[in-house]
Image (cartoon, coloured by chain):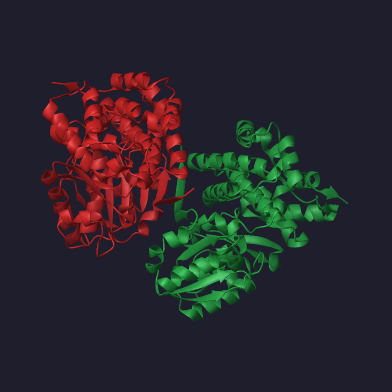
Chain colours: A red, B green
Amino acid sequence: MDFNYRMPTRVFFGRQCISRNKDFFARLGRKAFIVTGKSSARASGALDDIEGVLNEANIKYEIYDGVENNPSLNNVEEAGALAAKSGADFIIGIGGGSPLDASKAVAVLAVNRMEAVELYKNSFPNRPLPIIAIPTTAGTGSEVTPYCILTRPDMQTKMSFGNDETFPAAAFLDASYTESLTRSVTVNTAIDALTHAMEGYLSKRSTAVTDALAAESMEILGECLIALNNGEISPGTRDKLLYASMLAGMVIANTGTTIIHGMGYSLTYFKDIPHGEANALFVKEYLEFNRDAAPEKTDRVLGLLKVESTQQLGGVIASLIEEKPSLNGEEINYYADLTMKQRSTLSNIKTVSAQDIEGIIRRSVKQL
Amino acid sequence: MDFNYRMPTRVFFGRQCISRNKDFFARLGRKAFIVTGKSSARASGALDDIEGVLNEANIKYEIYDGVENNPSLNNVEEAGALAAKSGADFIIGIGGGSPLDASKAVAVLAVNRMEAVELYKNSFPNRPLPIIAIPTTAGTGSEVTPYCILTRPDMQTKMSFGNDETFPAAAFLDASYTESLTRSVTVNTAIDALTHAMEGYLSKRSTAVTDALAAESMEILGECLIALNNGEISPGTRDKLLYASMLAGMVIANTGTTIIHGMGYSLTYFKDIPHGEANALFVKEYLEFNRDAAPEKTDRVLGLLKVESTQQLGGVIASLIEEKPSLNGEEINYYADLTMKQRSTLSNIKTVSAQDIEGIIRRSVKQL
């Protein structure tokens, strides 16, 4: 039994967790720089709650609300320059995966003069500013991971950086911020969380601790998928989705993701398919491909999700998401090549070739 | 669903984890102060391993090997003064619960001019030095908790302090250091770990995350108790005991302990009964007392431990430990009063009175 484990992010979970823990903020400094997208931070109520506790604690703040979906290097460079100018003591990220990931890049760039592309060196002269992460979706897990995934036009894909210093110092998880999400965003992000737990569990880097967390996450997500399929999204389901998503984040913070994410990035980059939906497309074929390398673990995944077979799971997921995209043979080959270039592909429990990936993609989409 | 969760200690687990992660030490500074007991650090091989990596990294060090069993305020005051004089950048605790707990007090006292009794204020002008914790027993969990439990003759009991700043920065868990333990120390410390998981699980402060960790811990400890009862202590069992003990430490780092520990402290203070053995005596009556407040959780504890009833569990534990101690009525009443003064008693899942505690103690010992 050999493993390393780390989870330095402090978690505050529950309705009104920000106002109930307002004393925490005063310890962080006198000025905050808030990183968010155009509307969800305000619409969710999270930004109002944060402004309330910052004002009460006499902490000044500036807001950057220009984070794009799937943020680019240019996008975080702009925000990082503004953060540096602001003299902030800490960064607050509010939103789905895009703003939370961006907040990590901003925390580095606020105190390090470097181009955004140098973030991928993953080593920073000055320690990044402390990050407070407030998710408004239940799926990314970014609030408890060190990862920042940015779009790299130079490499035609999304790619992550992150080290021990880019873990958020604290995460505030209040499921009320997810109540205003549409059904399709709720479903997509839930399946993103499911793929985190599943890929971490079926990773060469899985450990005893991450398996325990992944199992807990999958068991709860299994209940949530049933509820989502029945069309019910009660406040209790919202709490469970946010909790399971956080657990899955704790898993990948230690294991990383594997080929589902690697394949999914191409569908997002080239076809603009939302991240969770892109991942969802591959779940069934991914499990069937890996099965012979980890038959017991695969069966446990199905058992935790309360389905009889990979076919049944595929059916549940298919009923929840949009139609399959259509790809031609050239596209499939190219996406497979890009997947093979992702470092995380090496961690898949079964060693994969480009041909294996092509096969999984081909079986998962409509081929033109 | 409302909870806070924190686990800032970085974990390195596995045989040779110190030498395999030697680069970690260079980041901590130029001088270490090692806190340990008279012999176990050397006998276990842990001290040799640490000296090896420190020498290789050109890190100077001083060794304080005077930690007593159940260390007193005077004991840590002496070590703290030497640490302050040494100019160390970080503290390394090596040993069972006593040296690991003492290392936390030393980390505070090395950089704060205060009497040891002021540690109980739990707030320190200067941030304690970073602590590296290396357990040589599998039970305390101290390597992943902020707690330091010291003997207070002024209050005739043991009492803990600890805050976010006294979590070890890192824990190195190598089960080979536990191979030289006697059977009775192995058993006592294993039952200490079991009571951590059980008390955390049956605490008013239990949360979803700590319940998942506690369940994993109890399931593994159940397998280990069977092995210990069969007289087998294989290297694999040593690994499992150390892993389960660490998980149980992560639980109580968030929930604290409850009445088993509160009652056990008196048996250690007045009767010199080892900590784990003291706790072991109360397990059966503790579960029976709490059952009506948490019937489902109690059944799950028994299920995870693979026993049919509290009686059967009591039998397994009784077969592993020394004979029951004899107490007179006055002693029982006094120990119950002391237990009621422990803050952690408030967290027991069933609210308790002094009479309840008296009853549990009376049924657990031989009454004179």
Classify residue B130 by image quadrant.
bottom left
Residue A52 percent coordinates (x, y): 31, 48
B244 sits left or right of A341 in the view: right
* Count of numbered marks: 0
For image coordinates 35% across by 43% down, the residue present is A252
For image coordinates 37% across by 22% down, the residue present is A310
Q: Nearer the viewer, residue B322 or B70?
A: B322
Residue B104 can be seen in this image: no
Classify residue A251 by image quadrant.
top left
Residue A229 against residue B6 in the figure, above or below: above
Residue A47 against residue A166 in the figure, above or below: above
Residue A114 percent coordinates (x, y): 16, 60
Residue A151 percent coordinates (x, y): 17, 44
Most extreme residue toward the right, as rendered?
A: B368
B45 sits left or right of A116 in the view: right
B260 sits left or right of B174 in the view: right
Residue A114 can be seen in this image: yes
For image coordinates 31% across by 44% down, the residue present is A142
For image coordinates 24% across by 40% down, the residue present is A42
Residue A350 percent coordinates (x, y): 34, 36
